[in-house]
C-alpha cells in the first residue's frame, strides 16, 4: 500500500512539474491596432475627350464618329501623353415631341470617348487647345490624380508606420506588468484607402485652356491625395 501511495505521490509531483513547465512555455500575446495618415502628390493630369455624332443611319453615324476620333488619336500619338478608349456605343436617339405627344426618332447617335493623361498639365492644355473649335468634340472630367507608381511606395511606408504605432501601443499596455512587445506574430489590414481625386472641371463643351483659366469652374484642384492605413497587429509579450 505504501509503495502505491509513494508511486502516486511521485507521479503527482512529476505531473505538477510538467504542468508548470508548460505554463511557462505558453506564448503570451497582445493584439492592438495601429494607424497611419499621410498624403501623396497628384502628379498626373487627365481629361476625357468625347466625340458624339448623329446621322440617319448607324453606319453613317459610326463612320463620322470613328473618323473624328481617328483624327484625335493621330494627333495624340505625336504628343507626350497616354490614351485609352473608355467608351464606344451607338444607339437610336429619341426626343419627346410635345405637339404630337410622342417620342420621335432623331437618328442614330454614336459616342466614342478616350481618356488622355500626362505628367504635365501643359500637355493637357495643348490637347484642349488643339480641338477647341472642332464640331462634335467635347471635353469632360479634367482632373489631377496620383498614379499607382507614385502611390505604391507611399502606401508601403505608411503600412510600416501603422505597424510601428501598433507596437508603441502594445508596449504601453504591457508596461503595466513590466513586460514589452516582442516579435510581430501577425498583421492584417483594417482598411487601406486613398481619397477619390476631386474633379476640377466637369464640362460638356470643348473650351480653350485660357478660357478655363478665366472661369472659376475651370480651376484644376491640385490638393494632395489623402492616404490612410490601419492595421490589427499581434505581438508576443516578453
Image (tube, rainbow, N blue to C red):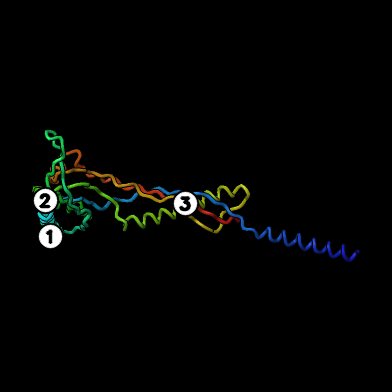
From this viewpoint, is residue 147 visible? yes
Q: Are marks 3 and 1 in contact (CB under 8 Å)?
A: no
Crowd rating for badge 1 (residues with CA inside 10 Å; few <14, some 14–19, many 20+): few
Image point (61%, 47%), residue name: 176
Residue that sits furthest to the right in the current view: 1
Nearest to the eye among marks 3 and 2: give it: 2
Please tell me which of labels 3 and 2 falls first in the chain: 2
Q: Secondary structure at mark 2?
A: loop
Judging by the rendered image, the residue that carries numbered circle 1 is 74
Q: CA distance from mark 2 to mark 1?
A: 12 Å
Alpha carbon separation for disc pair 3 and 1: 47 Å
Q: Answer with mark 3 or mark 1, whichever residue precedes in sequence.
A: 1
Q: Quadrant of residue 213?
A: top left
Instruction: Provide residue 185's location: percent of width, then percent of height.
Output: 54, 58
Q: Write the residue at 17% across / 43% down.
A: 204
**Mark 2 Cα-neighbour bin, 10 Å: few <14, some 14–19, many ≥20:** some
| Residue at the spot 65% in from the left edge and 60% down from the top edge | 25
Residue 131 tag number: 2
Q: Looking at the picture, how far across and down is residue 7, in whole percent?
A: 84, 65
**Residue 130 visible:** no
* Position of residue 142 in the picture relative to residue 171 (left or right): left
Question: Mark 1: which secondary structure?
Answer: helix
Amino acid at each position: 500500500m505504501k509503495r502505491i501511495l509513494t508511486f502516486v505521490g511521485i507521479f503527482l509531483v512529476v505531473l505538477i512539474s510538467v504542468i508548470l513547465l508548460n505554463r511557462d512555455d505558453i506564448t503570451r500575446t497582445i493584439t492592438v491596432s495601429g494607424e497611419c495618415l499621410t498624403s501623396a502628390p497628384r502628379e498626373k493630369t487627365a481629361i476625357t475627350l468625347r466625340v458624339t455624332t448623329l446621322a440617319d443611319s448607324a453606319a453613317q453615324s459610326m463612320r463620322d464618329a470613328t473618323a473624328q476620333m481617328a483624327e484625335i488619336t493621330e494627333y495624340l500619338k505625336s504628343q507626350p501623353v497616354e490614351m485609352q478608349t473608355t467608351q464606344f456605343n451607338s444607339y437610336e436617339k429619341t426626343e419627346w415631341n410635345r405637339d404630337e405627344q410622342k417620342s420621335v426618332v432623331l437618328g442614330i447617335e454614336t459616342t466614342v470617348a478616350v481618356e488622355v493623361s500626362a505628367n504635365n498639365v501643359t500637355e493637357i492644355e495643348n490637347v484642349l487647345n488643339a480641338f477647341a473649335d472642332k464640331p462634335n468634340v467635347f471635353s469632360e472630367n479634367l482632373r489631377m490624380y496620383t498614379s499607382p507608381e507614385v502611390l505604391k511606395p507611399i502606401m508601403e511606408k505608411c503600412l510600416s508606420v501603422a505597424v510601428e504605432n501598433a507596437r508603441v501601443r502594445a508596449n504601453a499596455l504591457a508596461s503595466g506588468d513590466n513586460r514589452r512587445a516582442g516579435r510581430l506574430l501577425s498583421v492584417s489590414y483594417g482598411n487601406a484607402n486613398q481619397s477619390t481625386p476631386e474633379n476640377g472641371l466637369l464640362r460638356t463643351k470643348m473650351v480653350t485652356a485660357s478660357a478655363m483659366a478665366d472661369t472659376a469652374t475651370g480651376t484644376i484642384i491640385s490638393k494632395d491625395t489623402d492616404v490612410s492605413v490601419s492595421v490589427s497587429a499581434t505581438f508576443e509579450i516578453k
